[in-house]
Image (cartoon, rainbow, N blue to C red):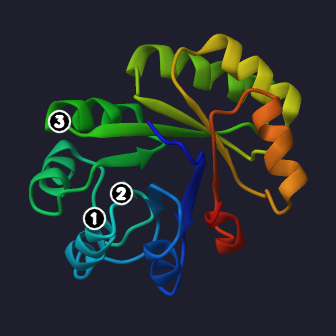
Amino acid sequence: MNSYPIIASITEEDQIQHALTSDVRRVILMTGTVNNLRQIVERLHDAGKQVFVHIEMVGGIGREASSIQYLAEVFRADGIVTTKSNAVAAARKAGILSIQRFFAIDTAAVETAVRMIKTADPDEVELMPGLMPRIIREVKQKIKQPLIVGGLIRHKDEIKLAYESGADFVSIGDSRYWHK
């Protein structure tokens, strides 16, 4: 899906310009509101980027199925990022991709997340934070989806370790790593 396995994690609107000229092919959008989302998605699409909207972070986007359908039809997002299994099902019904994000805060949280992932069947999974090589390996063995890791990754050696541990992609907000 992506010859450059870095995903731009856009948390501030001023990062959009950096993403437009970067080598990344995919972005996770965690900024903006329903008022400017169409313009942002169009700009990113015009630059050849695949856009995943984090529905819990972009203002004015609800988590119910009708909001996700609207996101697909009106804003033409390629997919969503969510922590909610019901939103994964809504994305599938709307014909867009889904990334189910979870936070590995303890063993029980990881086990619960793996069960939810197996039931919801998202297109991809994002593990947060991405600085846990053993957990990356364990989760990768338990799921069939591509694994994205993100959160707290700050250095090139941490990116390399994430890939060596089994991550398929790394999502990162530091635009220095958005170029090959």
Residue 88 position by quadrant: top left
Residue for badge 2 = 51
Q: Quadrant of residue 90?
A: top left
| Residue at 42% in and 58% down | 56
Among all residues in the image, which is located at the extreme left?
Answer: 73
Residue type at mark 3: give it.
Answer: Gly
Q: Amino acid at mark 1?
A: His
Q: CA distance from mark 2 to mark 1?
A: 7 Å
Of mark 3 and mark 2, the one earlier in the sequence is 2
What residue does disc 3 label? 95
Image side of residue 113 versus residue 82, left or right:
right
Q: Which mark is residue 45?
A: 1
Q: Are marks 2 and 1 in contact (CB under 8 Å)?
A: yes
The location of residue 92, given as percent across then percent down, is: 23, 31
Which of label 2 and label 1 is nearer to you? 1
Indicate the position of residue 180 as horizontal and vertical percent values. Answer: 65, 60
Q: Is residue 53 above or below residue 161?
A: below
